[in-house]
Amino acid sequence: MMIQFARRMLTEADPRLLFKFAYNFGYKGVRSVELYKKRLKQGIHFPPFLFISVISNCNLRCQGCWVDVEGEGDHIKLEDMNKLINDAKAHGNSFFGILGGEPFLHPQLMDIFAAHPDCYFQVFTNGQMITDAVAKRLREVGNVTPLISVEGSEIVSDERRGRLNVLSKTLAGIENCRRNKLIVGVATSVCQTNIDLVSEAWLNKLIKMGVHYCWFHTYRVVGPKPASHLALRPDQVLKVRKFMVAMRSKLPIAIVDAYWDDKGEALCPMATGVSHHISPYGDIEPCPIIQFAKETIHDGPSLYDSMVQSKFLQDFRETAAKATRGCVMLERPDLVKDLVVKYGARDTTTRQSAMSELVQLEPRTSQHDPDNVVPEDNWMYRFAKKHWFFGFGAYT
């Protein structure tokens, strides 16, 4: 299987893009985690990876979205992006997850990528704005992988994304990526209406489409219009986990997850400190779905200092890790509320209703299921997670 996957990558992707991926994401990504481990021994918490929502605007209106797509839009300015990326680079970081809204609505997105050829960017996108010209430009800059969201059949996609003809436009974006020999992924927010995509047949279809990796993440019930009817049951989350483990040793496509370590025990990237989030307004948040902050990228001498010195982030990590190995926002919204009140944290949304939304959240299960642990079976995934994606001492 791994030989087949390697053959796919070597024949389907531009060799220069493969080198950028291997060096900027692979080698330097491993180095950033090793530096993070060294910092932890000194009691310093600065994440090796940052997720940045560069814009709040979006061309879709997805069910359960927590981003302020209905409000007055805003985006991080080029100079601010360059400053925070350069600061992170100074401490060994090289990988950045770019979120929105829809990132390709950012007027200077390509300038951001071009300004940092020594970094690697993963763009979470609905793919509808990836025209052939955009894909060509992505090939030119060479340090970007689009992660394109597919939410189900044509009917389901229109319902989930709040617009018409969503799937065909998204598939056109994937095809433009394939034609221009990009490294491309597909993400699915797995919920009740699209859990049928958790299938071998779907993965085989993605392989035929030229997709190199996929990311199944479970739908989070948060935001101004939480769609609780879409949430997965615990047995369905277990089904997703078992499926990913099995397919990693069977099909020539990489399968990403952010919820479990090599032993199959649940984890939360925020609680482990491996990643935090920057909002479109520059707020430094624990994670994308926790829309409260004490600091911004404009505070203090640097992003590094603001994050390292943040008692708010520290307390969030420690409180979440003590409460659960899963998602504290889903399982213990009461603890999130207590921390927000304790620190007088700002509501970072333009709608200014995040607290009332939090108060109304009903606790529910997440990925933490200690009675049903599914260890990694594939030796490569097991090795990678054991050394570079685990609890980092958070769960003691």
Image: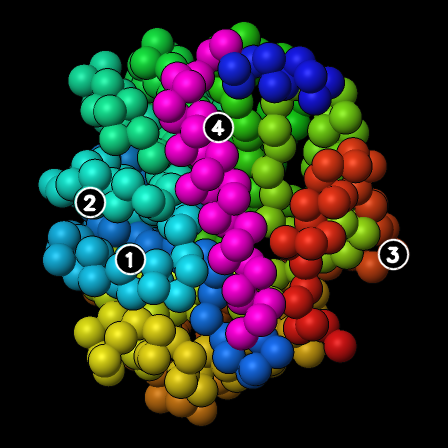
Q: Is any atom of residue 381 visible in this view? A: yes
Work out whether residue 97 or residue 155 is closer to the camera in this orientation and state it. 97
Tell me the number on the disc at residue 186: 4
Q: Quadrant of residue 246?
A: top right
Residue at 58 percent of width and 75 percent of height: 40
* Residue most extreme to the bottom: 342
Residue at 45 percent of width and 56 percent of height: 49
Q: Amino acid at mark 4?
A: Val
The secondary structure type at the circle numbered 2 is: helix
Identify the mark nearer the N-term, 2 or 3.
2
Q: Which residue is mark 3?
A: 371
User: Compared to 170, does 271 lie above or below?
Assistant: below
Q: Which residue is mark 1?
A: 85
The crowd level at tag 4 (other Cα within 10 Å; few <14, some 14-19, many 20+) is many
Q: Amino acid at mark 2?
A: Ala
Q: Which residues are magenta?
A: 11-39
Residue at 48 percent of width and 28 percent of height: 186
